[in-house]
């Protein structure tokens, strides 16, 4: 399955010429995800145990940043549920990314990692607890991958 995901992501990157924001759900929970920039996408349901979602990096015209917002509650973006945010901002050659939580920590007790090839490194929340402001950057043609692991 991972080979198929890697092939799909490589194809998407090759076609779009920019990298992707990727979320991999390795937990046993169904998750709910929205891409929020100039507009808010429809809710996407991310099944448990290995489901993957991605979008090509893009910048808004009013707000250049994009937040990939994830909850454990259907419709949670609009009800104040604890929300995990993979944020990114695309510029001419770089993508800047960060990890944040609002309204609580939805993945407390679960490891979270944000990885990319090259750039200034990764972000890791070993127990799902917010470890403070960490922003990293990478070439904008490389994927940024948030992986959510099962409880430890």
Image: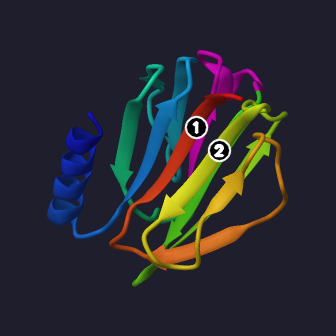
Disc 1 on helix, strand or loop?
strand
**Front-most of residues 83 and 4:** 4
State the residue position of label 2: 112
Give the vertical position of 42 relative to 124 (above or below): above
Which residue is rendered at x = 60% and y = 65% of the image? 122
Magenta stretch?
A: 66-81
Q: Is residue 79 magenta?
A: yes
Residue 14 is inside the magenta segment: no
> Which residue is at a point 49% across and 45% down the rendered structure image?
39
Counting residues from the start of the chain, the first of labels 2 and 1 encountered is: 2
Residue behind mark 1: 148
The image's colour scheme reads rainbow
Residue 50's place in the image compared with 48, above or below, is below
User: In the displayed structure, does residue 132 sit left or right of residue 88?
Assistant: right
Q: Position of residue 93 (x, y in %)?
A: 40, 84
**35 horizontally vs 77: left or right:** left
């Amino acid at each position: 399955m991972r080979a198929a995901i890697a092939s799909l992501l490589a194809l998407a990157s090759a076609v779009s010429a920019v990298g992707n924001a990727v979320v991999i759900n390795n937990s046993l929970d169904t998750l709910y995800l929205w891409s929020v920039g100039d507009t808010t996408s429809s809710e996407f349901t991310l099944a448990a145990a290995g489901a993957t979602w991605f979008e090509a990096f893009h910048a808004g015209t009013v707000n250049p940043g994009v937040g990939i917002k994830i909850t454990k509650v259907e419709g949670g973006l609009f009800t104040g549920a604890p929300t995990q945010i993979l944020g990114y901002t695309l510029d001419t050659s770089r993508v800047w990314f960060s990890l944040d939580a609002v309204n609580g920590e939805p993945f407390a007790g679960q490891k979270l990692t944000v990885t990319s090839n090259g750039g200034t490194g990764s972000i890791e929340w070993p127990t799902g607890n917010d470890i403070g402001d960490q922003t990293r950057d990478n070439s904008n043609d490389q994927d940024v991958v948030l992986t959510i692991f099962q409880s430890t």
